[in-house]
Image: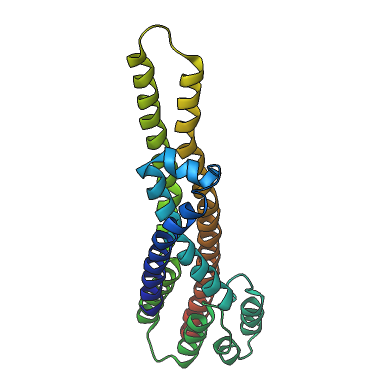
Amino acid sequence: MLLSRYFLKSAGLAAVIFCASIPAAFAQEATAEPGFWTLLFDKGGVVTWVIALLSAIGLPIAGVKLYQFYRMDIWRPKQVTEALSVYRNGEAAAPTLSALTHPAAALLAFAISQAQSGAMTPALLREELSRRAQYLLRHLSRNIWVLELIAASAPLFGLLGTVLGMIVAFQGVGQGGGGADTAILASGIWEALLTTAFGLAVALPFSMLSAILNNAVDDVRDLVEDALSDILVRSESANQQ
Protein backbone atom coordinates (compact mmCIF):
# COMPACT_ATOMS: atom_id res chain seq x y z
CA MET A 1 0.00 0.00 0.00
CA LEU A 2 2.82 2.41 0.88
CA LEU A 3 4.67 1.66 -2.37
CA SER A 4 1.47 2.06 -4.36
CA ARG A 5 0.89 5.50 -2.86
CA TYR A 6 4.50 6.39 -3.56
CA PHE A 7 4.05 5.35 -7.20
CA LEU A 8 1.02 7.59 -7.57
CA LYS A 9 2.73 10.54 -5.89
CA SER A 10 5.85 10.07 -8.03
CA ALA A 11 3.81 9.87 -11.23
CA GLY A 12 1.84 12.99 -10.30
CA LEU A 13 5.00 14.89 -9.39
CA ALA A 14 6.64 13.87 -12.66
CA ALA A 15 3.63 15.10 -14.61
CA VAL A 16 3.66 18.45 -12.78
CA ILE A 17 7.41 18.92 -13.34
CA PHE A 18 7.01 17.97 -16.99
CA CYS A 19 4.22 20.49 -17.56
CA ALA A 20 6.10 23.20 -15.65
CA SER A 21 9.25 22.71 -17.72
CA ILE A 22 7.47 23.10 -21.06
CA PRO A 23 7.37 26.93 -21.21
CA ALA A 24 11.03 27.21 -20.24
CA ALA A 25 12.07 24.75 -22.92
CA PHE A 26 10.27 26.68 -25.62
CA ALA A 27 11.47 30.05 -24.32
CA GLN A 28 15.09 28.97 -24.75
CA GLU A 29 14.50 28.17 -28.42
CA ALA A 30 12.29 31.14 -29.20
CA THR A 31 15.15 33.28 -30.49
CA ALA A 32 16.98 30.49 -32.29
CA GLU A 33 16.20 28.13 -35.12
CA PRO A 34 13.44 25.67 -34.22
CA GLY A 35 14.99 22.62 -32.59
CA PHE A 36 13.84 19.04 -32.87
CA TRP A 37 11.71 19.13 -29.73
CA THR A 38 10.11 22.44 -30.69
CA LEU A 39 9.33 21.06 -34.13
CA LEU A 40 8.01 17.82 -32.68
CA PHE A 41 5.62 19.43 -30.22
CA ASP A 42 4.62 22.16 -32.66
CA LYS A 43 3.82 19.83 -35.55
CA GLY A 44 2.66 16.85 -33.49
CA GLY A 45 -0.09 18.73 -31.73
CA VAL A 46 -2.05 17.38 -28.79
CA VAL A 47 -1.12 13.75 -29.51
CA THR A 48 2.57 14.50 -28.88
CA TRP A 49 1.74 16.03 -25.52
CA VAL A 50 -0.28 12.95 -24.56
CA ILE A 51 2.65 10.63 -25.42
CA ALA A 52 5.08 12.83 -23.50
CA LEU A 53 2.77 12.85 -20.46
CA LEU A 54 2.54 9.05 -20.56
CA SER A 55 6.33 8.89 -20.55
CA ALA A 56 6.55 11.33 -17.63
CA ILE A 57 4.12 9.18 -15.64
CA GLY A 58 5.81 5.87 -16.47
CA LEU A 59 9.43 6.82 -15.78
CA PRO A 60 9.15 7.23 -11.97
CA ILE A 61 7.05 4.06 -11.73
CA ALA A 62 9.67 2.10 -13.66
CA GLY A 63 12.49 3.58 -11.57
CA VAL A 64 10.83 2.76 -8.24
CA LYS A 65 9.91 -0.74 -9.42
CA LEU A 66 13.47 -1.50 -10.54
CA TYR A 67 14.83 -0.17 -7.24
CA GLN A 68 12.30 -2.26 -5.30
CA PHE A 69 13.27 -5.44 -7.14
CA TYR A 70 16.96 -4.65 -6.71
CA ARG A 71 16.56 -4.20 -2.95
CA MET A 72 14.69 -7.52 -2.79
CA ASP A 73 17.54 -9.36 -4.54
CA ILE A 74 14.90 -10.70 -6.89
CA TRP A 75 17.49 -11.35 -9.59
CA ARG A 76 19.78 -13.22 -7.17
CA PRO A 77 17.91 -16.28 -5.89
CA LYS A 78 21.09 -18.27 -5.29
CA GLN A 79 20.92 -18.00 -1.49
CA VAL A 80 17.29 -19.17 -1.52
CA THR A 81 18.11 -22.22 -3.65
CA GLU A 82 21.06 -23.03 -1.38
CA ALA A 83 18.81 -22.86 1.70
CA LEU A 84 16.31 -25.16 -0.01
CA SER A 85 19.11 -27.61 -0.76
CA VAL A 86 19.97 -27.58 2.94
CA TYR A 87 16.31 -28.30 3.76
CA ARG A 88 16.20 -31.22 1.32
CA ASN A 89 19.26 -32.66 3.05
CA GLY A 90 17.33 -32.79 6.32
CA GLU A 91 18.89 -29.77 8.00
CA ALA A 92 17.23 -26.65 9.44
CA ALA A 93 16.71 -24.04 6.70
CA ALA A 94 13.95 -21.79 8.07
CA PRO A 95 16.27 -19.48 10.08
CA THR A 96 18.50 -19.00 7.04
CA LEU A 97 15.55 -18.18 4.80
CA SER A 98 14.10 -15.73 7.32
CA ALA A 99 17.28 -13.63 7.14
CA LEU A 100 17.17 -13.25 3.35
CA THR A 101 15.62 -10.31 1.50
CA HIS A 102 14.40 -12.29 -1.51
CA PRO A 103 10.60 -12.00 -1.75
CA ALA A 104 10.11 -15.77 -1.68
CA ALA A 105 12.32 -16.35 1.37
CA ALA A 106 9.82 -15.37 4.09
CA LEU A 107 7.04 -17.46 2.53
CA LEU A 108 9.25 -20.53 2.23
CA ALA A 109 10.52 -20.09 5.79
CA PHE A 110 6.90 -20.00 7.01
CA ALA A 111 6.05 -23.09 4.96
CA ILE A 112 8.97 -25.08 6.33
CA SER A 113 8.34 -24.09 9.95
CA GLN A 114 4.62 -24.92 9.72
CA ALA A 115 5.28 -28.21 7.94
CA GLN A 116 7.78 -29.27 10.58
CA SER A 117 5.63 -28.18 13.55
CA GLY A 118 2.49 -29.92 12.32
CA ALA A 119 0.30 -27.13 13.73
CA MET A 120 -1.87 -27.18 10.59
CA THR A 121 -3.36 -30.08 8.72
CA PRO A 122 -1.88 -30.63 5.24
CA ALA A 123 -5.06 -29.39 3.56
CA LEU A 124 -5.22 -26.25 5.70
CA LEU A 125 -1.52 -25.59 5.22
CA ARG A 126 -1.90 -25.93 1.46
CA GLU A 127 -4.72 -23.38 1.40
CA GLU A 128 -2.80 -20.93 3.57
CA LEU A 129 0.35 -21.20 1.48
CA SER A 130 -1.66 -20.74 -1.72
CA ARG A 131 -3.23 -17.59 -0.30
CA ARG A 132 0.11 -16.14 0.76
CA ALA A 133 1.75 -17.02 -2.55
CA GLN A 134 -1.01 -15.28 -4.51
CA TYR A 135 -0.67 -12.20 -2.33
CA LEU A 136 3.10 -12.16 -2.84
CA LEU A 137 2.79 -12.38 -6.62
CA ARG A 138 0.11 -9.68 -6.71
CA HIS A 139 2.38 -7.44 -4.65
CA LEU A 140 5.32 -7.99 -7.00
CA SER A 141 3.20 -7.41 -10.11
CA ARG A 142 1.65 -4.21 -8.79
CA ASN A 143 1.83 -1.23 -11.19
CA ILE A 144 3.60 -3.20 -13.94
CA TRP A 145 0.32 -2.90 -15.84
CA VAL A 146 0.96 0.84 -16.11
CA LEU A 147 4.19 0.22 -18.01
CA GLU A 148 2.44 -2.31 -20.24
CA LEU A 149 -0.36 0.18 -20.92
CA ILE A 150 2.14 2.88 -21.90
CA ALA A 151 4.03 0.45 -24.15
CA ALA A 152 0.80 -0.54 -25.89
CA SER A 153 -0.87 2.87 -26.14
CA ALA A 154 2.07 5.12 -27.10
CA PRO A 155 2.41 3.69 -30.65
CA LEU A 156 -1.37 3.89 -31.11
CA PHE A 157 -1.39 7.55 -30.09
CA GLY A 158 1.52 8.10 -32.48
CA LEU A 159 -0.38 6.40 -35.29
CA LEU A 160 -3.43 8.51 -34.50
CA GLY A 161 -1.34 11.66 -34.78
CA THR A 162 0.09 10.49 -38.09
CA VAL A 163 -3.35 9.74 -39.53
CA LEU A 164 -4.65 13.14 -38.44
CA GLY A 165 -1.57 14.83 -39.91
CA MET A 166 -1.98 12.97 -43.21
CA ILE A 167 -5.61 14.05 -43.39
CA VAL A 168 -4.60 17.67 -42.93
CA ALA A 169 -1.78 17.34 -45.49
CA PHE A 170 -3.98 15.83 -48.18
CA GLN A 171 -6.75 18.28 -47.38
CA GLY A 172 -4.37 21.17 -47.96
CA VAL A 173 -3.18 19.73 -51.27
CA GLY A 174 -6.75 19.09 -52.37
CA GLN A 175 -7.85 22.62 -51.59
CA GLY A 176 -4.86 24.11 -53.39
CA GLY A 177 -6.34 23.39 -56.81
CA GLY A 178 -4.43 22.36 -59.88
CA GLY A 179 -1.74 19.68 -59.67
CA ALA A 180 -0.46 18.45 -56.34
CA ASP A 181 2.72 20.15 -55.17
CA THR A 182 5.12 17.31 -54.36
CA ALA A 183 7.17 19.42 -51.95
CA ILE A 184 4.13 20.48 -49.95
CA LEU A 185 2.82 16.92 -49.84
CA ALA A 186 6.19 15.51 -48.76
CA SER A 187 6.50 18.16 -46.05
CA GLY A 188 3.08 17.28 -44.69
CA ILE A 189 3.85 13.55 -44.70
CA TRP A 190 7.15 13.75 -42.82
CA GLU A 191 5.65 16.12 -40.28
CA ALA A 192 2.80 13.66 -39.74
CA LEU A 193 5.23 10.77 -39.24
CA LEU A 194 6.88 12.56 -36.31
CA THR A 195 4.21 11.38 -33.88
CA THR A 196 4.59 7.74 -34.93
CA ALA A 197 8.35 7.92 -34.42
CA PHE A 198 7.87 9.57 -31.03
CA GLY A 199 5.29 6.98 -29.97
CA LEU A 200 7.58 4.10 -30.93
CA ALA A 201 10.54 5.74 -29.16
CA VAL A 202 8.50 5.93 -25.95
CA ALA A 203 6.96 2.46 -26.30
CA LEU A 204 10.18 0.49 -26.88
CA PRO A 205 11.89 1.13 -23.50
CA PHE A 206 8.65 0.66 -21.56
CA SER A 207 7.97 -2.59 -23.42
CA MET A 208 11.44 -3.85 -22.52
CA LEU A 209 11.09 -2.76 -18.88
CA SER A 210 7.71 -4.42 -18.45
CA ALA A 211 9.07 -7.63 -20.01
CA ILE A 212 12.06 -7.61 -17.64
CA LEU A 213 9.86 -7.03 -14.58
CA ASN A 214 7.29 -9.64 -15.63
CA ASN A 215 10.07 -12.15 -16.23
CA ALA A 216 11.37 -11.52 -12.71
CA VAL A 217 7.88 -12.13 -11.28
CA ASP A 218 7.58 -15.33 -13.33
CA ASP A 219 10.91 -16.56 -11.95
CA VAL A 220 9.65 -15.98 -8.41
CA ARG A 221 6.41 -17.80 -9.25
CA ASP A 222 8.30 -20.82 -10.60
CA LEU A 223 10.60 -20.89 -7.57
CA VAL A 224 7.70 -20.63 -5.12
CA GLU A 225 5.56 -23.26 -6.85
CA ASP A 226 8.40 -25.77 -7.03
CA ALA A 227 9.56 -25.20 -3.45
CA LEU A 228 6.07 -25.25 -1.90
CA SER A 229 5.16 -28.43 -3.76
CA ASP A 230 8.31 -30.09 -2.43
CA ILE A 231 7.65 -28.90 1.13
CA LEU A 232 4.04 -30.08 1.09
CA VAL A 233 4.92 -33.47 -0.36
CA ARG A 234 7.57 -33.99 2.32
CA SER A 235 5.14 -32.89 5.01
CA GLU A 236 2.41 -35.27 3.86
CA SER A 237 4.90 -38.13 3.56
CA ALA A 238 6.12 -37.51 7.09
CA ASN A 239 2.53 -37.47 8.43
CA GLN A 240 1.73 -40.77 6.73
CA GLN A 241 4.72 -42.42 8.33
Relative to 239, residue 15 above or below: above
Q: Where is residue 23 in the image (x, y as percent from the top left)?
A: 42, 56
Which residue is found at the position 61% from the left and 91% from the top? 92
Place residue 89 in its image quadrant.
bottom right
Front one among 20 and 170: 20
Place residue 19 in its image quadrant.
bottom left
Relative to 190, residue 55 above or below: below
Image colouring: rainbow
The reply to whether residue 147 is visible in this rendering is: no
Relative to 177, residue 7 above or below: below
Place residue 118 in its image quadrant.
bottom left
In the figure, is residue 13 to the left or right of 202? Answer: left
How many numbered marks appear?
0
Q: Where is residue 86 in the image (x, y as percent from the top left)?
A: 66, 84
Front one among 149 and 30: 30
Q: Where is residue 234 in the image (x, y as percent from the top left)?
A: 53, 79
Which residue is found at the position 35% from the left and 10% from the top? 177
Front one among 206 and 96: 206
The reply to whether residue 139 is visible in this rendering is: yes
Q: Residue furthest front?
A: 31
Which residue is found at the position 46% from the left and 93% from the top? 117
Q: Position of residue 107 (x, y in %)?
A: 48, 81
In the figure, is residue 228 to the left or right of 83? Answer: left
Quadrant including the N terminus: bottom left
